[in-house]
Amino acid sequence: MSYRAILMLLTFFFALISPLHTIATSHGAHNLWRILKPASPERFLVFEASIMPWIKKEFANNKVLMSNGSVIKRGLVRSDLLRFENIEGQDRYNVHIEYRVFIKDVSGTEIAGLKGQEIVFLVNDGMVEDYFPFDEYWIEGTILDKEEFY
């Protein structure tokens, strides 16, 4: 490889890495490195010991019968710790959950699919103190009429 080709490759490499270095070393009000950095092992232990049992308890009763005769079944598929932040002394855990859902209404229409949701948990001394769920969203779903399903 010629000297000129090596010089061009190095120039290209440094042009690519320069913005990444800027993100990783910025110390402004919006510290992007905090978002990109994974949570520490001790934070994962708190997630596993406090938040996961709380989530599993919420999904323990997976069948709900509505007053109008509709049936909703939910089952946890996965949960992931996306980010940990300590803001003004509060430990905030941003968690993503995915769960399967089956809905059958009184008309016989059935909906089956996978939903997702983000939840921010406030944890104090290893206990879930409060939580803030965001809107649920469909990842994938299928609507089946009674004759299509059976």
Image: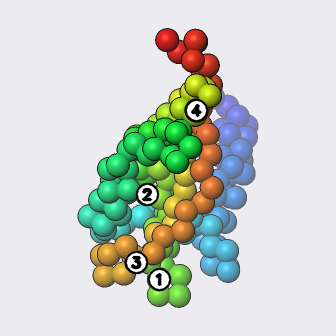
- Marks 3 and 2 sit apart, C-alpha to C-alpha, by 17 Å
x 31%, y 81%: residue: 125
x 68%, y 40%: residue: 9
Q: Would you name the residue on which mark 1 appears? A: 90
- Marks 3 and 4 sit apart, C-alpha to C-alpha, by 38 Å
Q: Helix, strand or loop at disc 2?
A: strand
Does residue 40 sit above or below 7 in this rendering?
A: below
Q: Would you name the residue on which mark 2 appears? A: 81
Looking at marks 4 and 2 on the same chain, the residue that comes earlier in the sequence is marked by 2
Instruction: Please state which of the two labelled residues, at mark 3 or mark 4, is closer to the viewer.
Output: 4
**Tag 4: amino acid:** Val
Position of 108 compared to 78: left or right? right
Instruction: Please state which of the two labelled residues, at mark 4 or mark 2, is closer to the viewer.
Output: 4
Q: Helix, strand or loop at disc 3?
A: strand
**Tag 3: amino acid:** Glu
**Tag 1: amino acid:** Gln
Q: Would you name the residue on which mark 4 appears? A: 106
User: Whole-percent x and y of residue 86?
Assistant: 48, 79
Looking at marks 4 and 1 on the same chain, the residue that comes earlier in the sequence is marked by 1
User: Whole-percent x and y of residue 104?
Assistant: 54, 32
Q: Are dots 4 and 2 in contact, CB under 8 Å?
A: no
Q: Are dots 3 and 2 in contact, CB under 8 Å?
A: no
Q: Residue 8 occupies which quadrant of the picture?
A: top right
Q: Is residue 99 visible?
A: no
Q: Would you name the residue on which mark 3 appears? A: 129
Quadrant housing the N terminus: top right
Outermost residue to the bottom: 88
**Tag 2: amino acid:** Leu
Instruction: Please state which of the two labelled residues, at mark 1 or mark 3, is closer to the viewer.
Output: 3
Looking at marks 1 and 2 on the same chain, the residue that comes earlier in the sequence is marked by 2
- Marks 4 and 2 sit apart, C-alpha to C-alpha, by 37 Å
Looking at marks 1 and 3 on the same chain, the residue that comes earlier in the sequence is marked by 1
